[in-house]
Amino acid sequence: MDDSREILAVLCNCPDAGCAETLARGLVEEGLAACVNQLAPVQSVYRWQGRTEIAAEVPLLIKTTRARYPALQAWLEARHPYDLPEIIALPVVAGLPAYLRWVGDATSG
C-alpha cells in the first residue's frame, strides 16, 4: 500500500455522546473517515492548567488514511468544543486486506 493509502486509527475524546455522534457523522459524511466507532464512556484523569482533573468522556476511534489525516485534524480542531482536544493518530500495522482497501476507497474522495 502506498503512503497516501496508509491506514491510521485516530483517537479523539468528546465531552458527551451528542458531541461524539455529531463529530462522527460529520467525519464520515465529509469523506474524512471511512468509519468512526463511538465507544463506551470512560473516565479520564489528566493535568490541565496546573490541576489534576477527572472527567467523563466519550472516545471516538476513527479510521482514515495518512493522506486524509491533515484535513481530518483541521476539521476536528474547527468543530471540537475543547480548547485542546485529544487528536492522536496511530498507524495500523496490519489488518484484513479487504477492510484496509475499503478504508482507503471510502476516504479517497
Image: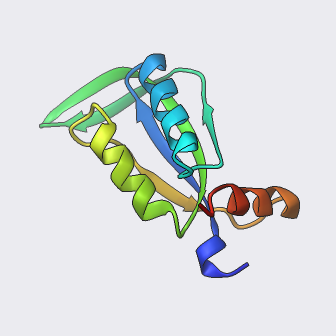
In the displayed orientation, state which residue is furthest to the front.
Answer: 109
Coordinates of residue 107 in the picture (x, y in percent):
62, 58
In this view, the residue in front, 44 or 29, is 29
Residue at horizontal 32 percent and vertical 36 percent from the top: 80
Q: Count the marks.
A: 0
Direction from residue 55 to residue 102 in the image, left or right: right
Direction from residue 86 to residue 3 in the image, left or right: right
Direction from residue 49 to residue 47 in the image, left or right: right
In the displayed orientation, state which residue is furthest to the left.
Answer: 50
Residue at horizontal 24 percent and vertical 37 percent from the top: 47
Residue at horizontal 54 percent and vertical 68 percent from the top: 66
Q: Quadrant of residue 4?
A: bottom right
Q: Quadrant of residue 93?
A: bottom right
Pick the quarter of the image with the C terminus.
Answer: bottom right
Coordinates of residue 61 in the picture (x, y in percent):
58, 41
Q: Quadrant of residue 48?
A: top left
Residue at horizontal 72 percent and vertical 61 percent from the top: 105
Pick the quarter of the image with the N terminus.
Answer: bottom right
Q: Is residue 22 above or below residue 56?
A: below
Direction from residue 53 to residue 42 in the image, left or right: right
Q: Is residue 19 above or below residue 4?
A: above
Way the structure is coloured:
rainbow
Q: Is residue 6 above or below residue 60?
A: below
In this view, the residue in front, 23 or 38, is 23
Coordinates of residue 26 in the picture (x, y in percent):
49, 37
